Amino acid sequence: MRLALHLAAMATASQHQLPTASPRGLRYRVDAAEHRRGPSPGNGERARRVVNMSVAGIGLVLAVPLMMVIAALIKLTSPGPVLFMQTRIGLDERGPGSTRGNGRRRLDHGGRPFTIYKFRTMAASDGDAQVWARPDDARVTALGRILRTYRLDELPQLVNVLRGDMNLVGPRPEQPKIFAELRQQVAGYELRQRVRPGITGWAQINHHYDSSIDDVRRKVAYDLEYVMRQSLVEDLKIMVWTVPVVAFKQGAW
């Protein structure tokens, strides 16, 4: 019950593979995505937000009993907090080339930083440690490995959806330091921020977690594909395709 109250308080304050992206193909996606200025009421964003809020709200209510069980198991099996909280980079609401904003916004983070919520899956999680997890990561607990395999550790992100930080569908949000490094190394990486980040997405159902720059390039190609064709229908399709991906443990560690 304490977990449910805590989450409520926070809320208120099938593989469908595309061909591996070639440099030319990725460049095309970058050029096309540069013409998209991000979410706007004109491209169905309001309807998509209504669907996101509705599905996230219903999902959170239905998931509370399971989340309470997970929280109890985390406390019983390893020391530390139940929830893992970390800063991620979210939606960039500025248009391409925009310099508007006050002095505090002169430092370009690439998007609005926000706090993401997850169930803790590591024995010693450091919210400031900005590194990629690995398939054989020794920090992951036995329970955490199960949670990560079935993506149950991401259930608290329904709160992020209700808060407006994320959508159910979109590119995965990255940590600030890693984001800053990747946008210097991967063409078009920052264009992923033209849409809200998501719990699931076109890249997530087609590719595993990132462990190398090559993985990032492949996922960016998928993300930019999504940016170009984003719509309510596309989101609903990806939500449906996510079910077998999670059920059959595809792409998870």
Image (cartoon, rainbow, N blue to C red):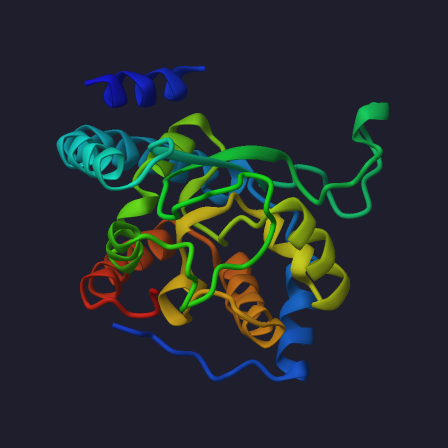
Horizontal placement of 190 versus 160: left or right?
right
User: Which residue is at the front of the view, 237 or 248?
Assistant: 248
How many marks on residues?
0
Vertical placement of residue 231 versus 250, above or below: above
Horizontal placement of 117 versus 95: left or right?
left
User: Which residue is at the front of the view, 87 or 69?
Assistant: 69
Horizontal placement of 226 versus 70: left or right?
right
Q: Residue at x 15, y 33 (%)?
A: 62
Q: Residue 106: image x %, image y %?
A: 84, 33
Q: Residue at x 31, y 46 (%)?
A: 153
Q: Residue 30: image x %, image y %?
A: 67, 66
Residue 209 placement: quadrant = bottom left
Horizontal placement of 148 versus 215: left or right?
left
Q: Residue 137: image x %, image y %?
A: 43, 62
Q: Residue at x 18, y 62 (%)?
A: 247
Q: Quadrant of the C terminus?
A: bottom left
Q: Residue at x 76, y 48 (%)?
A: 96
Q: Residue 158: image x %, image y %?
A: 34, 35
Q: Quadrant of the N terminus?
A: top left
